Amino acid sequence: NAGVTQTPKFQVLKTGQSMTLQCAQDMNHNSMYWYRQDPGMGLRLIYYSASEGTTDKGEVPNGYNVSRLNKREFSLRLESAAPSQTSVYFCASSSLDQIRGEQFFGPGTRLTVL
Amino acid sequence: AQKITQTQPGMFVQEKEAVTLDCTYDTSDPSYGLFWYKQPSSGEMIFLIYQGSYDQQNATEGRYSLNFQKARKSANLVISASQLGDSAMYFCAMNRRPGGFKTIFGAGTRLFVKA
């Protein structure tokens, strides 16, 4: 039972390049999320998927796109990377069947855009 | 709009002592949930404790307890009998309940446990 996995763990991009961050969960959770964490700040929600087939914007969606490929997988795409997107990216999942609905996080992807 | 404020950027505590990490929040939602997460230096986010706004009792999970004061809009985390492994960043978070997909996080408090 791996929980939430993310690939890659580290990535360096040049301004204007594109890339996709992959996330998968094996806990049969309905909902999945993408966050970014910048120094001195908490996590900020980029996009979320309440259930398979739906996606919605979070607090900071500009410059990103997402795909909920199936119930297990939720990817985040940067079409044209900018230095302001240098950050640590976390994927998370949760089950709304549970009262608490706490989120389970992946290990993160450290992205640097030069 | 919802807001979480953690006013303590860093805290020190002696091993085996108790420590309180502050969290205040603001929301117009009548029903909401409050969470605390721990982020060790290794970087992963670990769920610690949850408090629902309509829960009658303060939440407890082992050495963690949540001092929930609804009228003051505070949800402080109390860690009893601190251990060296408690040294980490701690984040307070909240979302609307039910159906709270948009969770907001505070800026965090870094806790240092001294031997």
Image: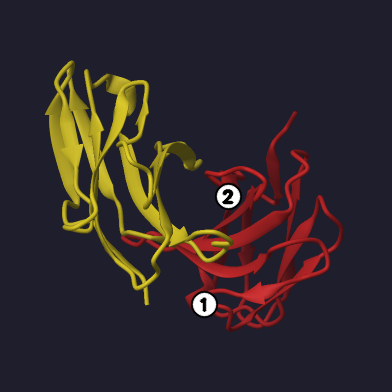
Q: Are marks 1 and 2 in contact (CB under 8 Å)?
A: no
Q: Which lettered chain is shown in yellow?
A: B
Residue at 39% x, 66% y is B30
Is there one chain holding both mark 1 and mark 2?
Answer: yes
Residue at 81% x, 50% y is A72
In the image, residue A48 lies at what x, y percent? Answer: 64, 66
Q: Look at the numbered disc 2 and give the secondary structure of its residue.
A: loop
In the image, residue B96 lies at what x, y percent? Answer: 47, 63
State which tag comes first along the sequence, 1 or 2: 1
- The residue that disc 2 covers is A108
Between A57 and B69, the residue placed more toward the observer is: B69
Between B85 and A39, the residue placed more toward the observer is: B85
- Dot 1: few (<14), some (14–19), or many (≥20) neighbours within 10 Å? few
- Residue B114, placed above or below residue A78: above
Q: Chain of mark 2?
A: A
Mark number displayed over residue A60: 1
**What's the residue type where badge 2 is placed?**
Gly
Q: Decide if residue A34 is on the left or right side of residue B66.
A: right
Question: In front: mark 1 or mark 2?
Answer: 1
Q: Look at the numbered disc 1 and give the secondary structure of its residue.
A: loop
Q: Quadrant of the C terminus of chain A?
A: bottom right
In the image, residue B1 lies at what x, y percent? Answer: 37, 77
Q: Quadrant of the N terminus of chain A?
A: top right
